[in-house]
Amino acid sequence: MCYGKFKILPQAAEVWFSSVAQKYRQAVPESGISPDGDEEKRAGEILFVPTLFSALGAPASVLEVKATDADEGINGRVWYRIVKGNEHNHFRINPSTGLVMRGVRHLDREQNSSHVLEVEAYNTEQGPMRSSVRVIVYVEDVNDEVPVFTQRQYNRLGLRETAGIGTSVAVVRATDRDTGNGGLVNYKIVSGAEGKFEIDESTGLITTIEYLDYETKTSYLMNVSATDQAPPNNQGFCSVYVSLLNELDEAVQFSNSSYEAVIMENIPLGSEVLRVQARSIDNLNQITYKFDPNTNPQALSLFKINGITGVITVRGQVDREKGDFYTLTVVADDGGPKIDSTVVTITVLDENDNSPQFDITSDSSVSVAEDSPVGKRVALVLARDPDAGRNGQVTFSLTSGNIGRAFEIRTTNNTYGEVFVARPLDRELLDHYTLRIQASDGGVPPRRKEHILRVNVLDVNDNPPVIDSPFGYNVSNVGGGTAVAQVRATDRDIGLNSVLSFYITRGNEDLTFRMDRVTGEIATRPSPPDRERQSFYSLVVTVEDEGNPSLSAFKEFGESGTGSGKGQTRDISPAYS
């Protein structure tokens, strides 16, 4: 935590900054006096360089700036504000005291190692009397990064078995984004050296410390660690594979121990990648070049080398999605007993030449109940793009079939498309949707692929039966077992939810009538109605569906022993049973 302050000295025309640890002084233009007698604050640029730890808590104080005004009363009151450099709210300032403090946003040195703030002192918001100072805050690092090797495995193929002690074998390199000791990396061979190799702990150069013998051992696989130099001493690991080359006595040597090249995928056939060059000690014979037969077959199918010039060119279609890094071992031979080899590494960069592809596990047909709540996930699709970076990042959208915007799709991890219910569904209005899902990558221009998803809306028992108005009969002089009325009803649901049963639930206490449960037909029982005993019947008919829970409707109508033959009906509100 650092504190400091500045003040304007009109007579000396200088600005002083003092802090606990250090002072800064810089000459500024001489202060002037405004026509109305007010002292005008003029400050030159003042640099304050405190240090903050990136893990420091949010409310920590940074420093205190202080400006003085020779005026009195309200004209001498000074306010403070940060006017520049605080776009991400990493800092805040007390407007009355000038105390600069940490803001709510977390500091990350790996993203921004310093912050330049301009603090202004003023009397009023719109007044001309103001002065400013610049504060530079450097963020000190904490050791929160792990060393990362440039390769998981380094290969040195064809190392000469007669290589002398101290011969360079390979250089491993790891980087650590931290600073200071946290960014310094020391290398160590953990295992596999068998007393033949050592590594420079600072440079990562692996060299031989003992003579090699192809007849005794043909290859070595070493495990190498990189450790940073600050607690908690983070470590990273890689492997180094060394194969030995059986040789005789002559010396041929490449000008470089290794070569590197970077190319774009889909590079035209015949394009030059790089040229290797070797020389022999005696310089008598023509040196010829070829790839080591132990080189990866895929690399050999893509590149070729001119045996005389050492120029490596493209011979096959280079597709980054099939391989983005190739290691070629080139052998130089002058016809004598000794040959040499070098390692050529070729990195392939990406271009947007692949469209997203939907996985076979993606949903293509799903069913969802019509009473599913808004926000419920109903389907999942998966699409991948083998390109790299933004070219391989996939986003999803619904391009057609989303009637009434009933669904929405969200992209997760640039790979998954989750389909959710966005609005209430009603099977009776629409019983299925055919959604066209589009997967687009982030390339310029983007590449797209489409997928069809059928969503079937399942019925729930949300509609009660609807009873048509029945017709009555004059039941005078009818025999037993005579049909006197037909009750008809409908239900907008489907399946068991629309299967209806009919009952007489009131008005038939003497059992004069019976009702067919399936057809809804009302008939007299074997003993016909007796007009002298009862001349009018008011029957309540209940119609119930087979849903769970079931829904029912009621309707009341009359049967007259005399009259025109028309019955009377009266609706009763539907109800659950």
Image (tube, helix red, strand yellow):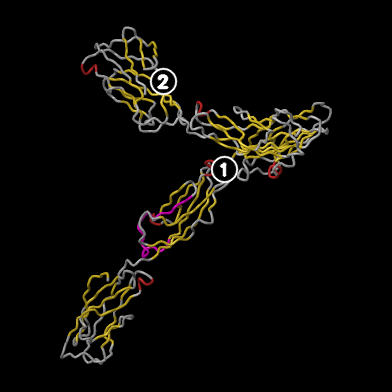
Image location of residue 339, percent across then percent down? 78, 33
For the residue carrying disc 1, how many other residues have a C-alpha within 10 Å: few (<14), some (14-19), or many (20+)?
many
- Which residue is farthest left? 532
User: Image quadrant of residue 404?
Assistant: bottom left
User: Is 418 contained in the magenta span?
Assistant: yes
- Which quadrant is the N terminus positioned in? top left
At x 44%, y 52%, the residue is 418
- Which residue is farthest top? 11
| Residue underneath mark 1 | 352
Q: Are marks 2 and 1 in contact (CB under 8 Å)?
A: no
Q: Which mark is residue 101?
A: none
At x 50%, y 34%, the residue is 145
User: Image quadrant of residue 22?
Assistant: top left
At x 82%, y 26%, the residue is 282
Q: Which mark is residue 49?
A: 2
For the residue carrying disc 2, how many other residues have a C-alpha within 10 Å: few (<14), some (14-19), or many (20+)?
many
Q: Amino acid at mark 2?
A: Val
Image location of residue 357, percent across then percent down? 54, 51
For label 2, the SS is loop
For label 1, the SS is loop
Q: 190 and 133: which one is in front?
A: 190
Q: Amino acid at mark 1?
A: Asn
Number of marks present in the image shown = 2
Q: 333 and 140: which one is in front?
A: 140
Q: Name above or below for residue 213 compared with residue 357.
A: above
User: Is 288 contained in the magenta span?
Assistant: no
Q: 475 and 170: which one is in front?
A: 170
Image location of residue 455, percent across then percent down? 44, 60
Q: Which residues are magenta?
A: 416-432
- Which quadrant is the C terminus positioned in? bottom left
Instruction: Report the mark closest to the observer, 2 or 1.
Output: 2
User: Image quadrant of residue 170?
Assistant: top right
